[in-house]
Image: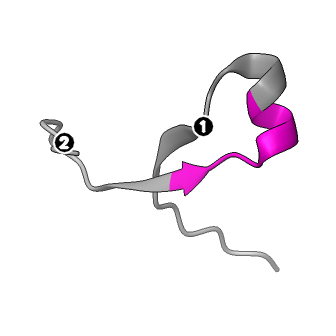
Amino acid sequence: MHWQGNETVYPHFINESAYCQSNIAMAMAEKRTVRVS
């Protein structure tokens, strides 16, 4: 898969039971850092 966007994205794969309901097997996500205090 070739990504043509400006930011770095990471694929995450959806498990089979969720895929059957929504017909989505993979989605792309941006990396974010969250500080918890």
Q: What element carries label 2?
A: loop
Residue 3 in percent (x, y) is at 19, 42
The answer to which of 23 and 8 lies nearer the viewer is 23
The amino acid pointed to by label 1 is Ala
Q: Is residue 3 above or below residue 23?
A: below
Residue 17 belongs to magenta span: yes
Amino acid type indicated by mark 2: Trp
Specify start and end residues of the magenta stretch as a single range.
Answer: 12-19
| Of the two numbered discs 1 and 2 in the rendering, the one whose residue sits closer to the viewer | 1
Q: CB of mark 1 within 8 Å of CB of mark 2? A: no
Q: CA–CA distance between discs 1 and 2?
A: 17 Å
In this picture, residue 22 sits left or right of residue 27: right
Identified at 78% across, 43% down, the residue is: 16
User: At which x and y percent is residue 12?
Assistant: 56, 54
Residue under label 1: 25
Residue with the mark numbered 2? 3
Tell me the crowding category of disc 2: few under 14, some 14 to 19, or many 20 or more residues within 10 angstroms, Cα based: few
Quadrant of image for the C terminus: bottom right
Disc 1 crowd rating (10 Å Cα; few below 14, some 14-19, many 20+) is few
Residue 28 is inside the magenta segment: no
| Residue 14 shown left or right of residue 7 in the figure | right
Point out residue 21 in the picture as x, y percentages from the top left corner: 83, 20
Q: Nearer the viewer, residue 8 or 13?
A: 13
Quarter of the image holding residue 22? top right
Residue at horizontal 51 percent and vertical 61 percent from the top: 32
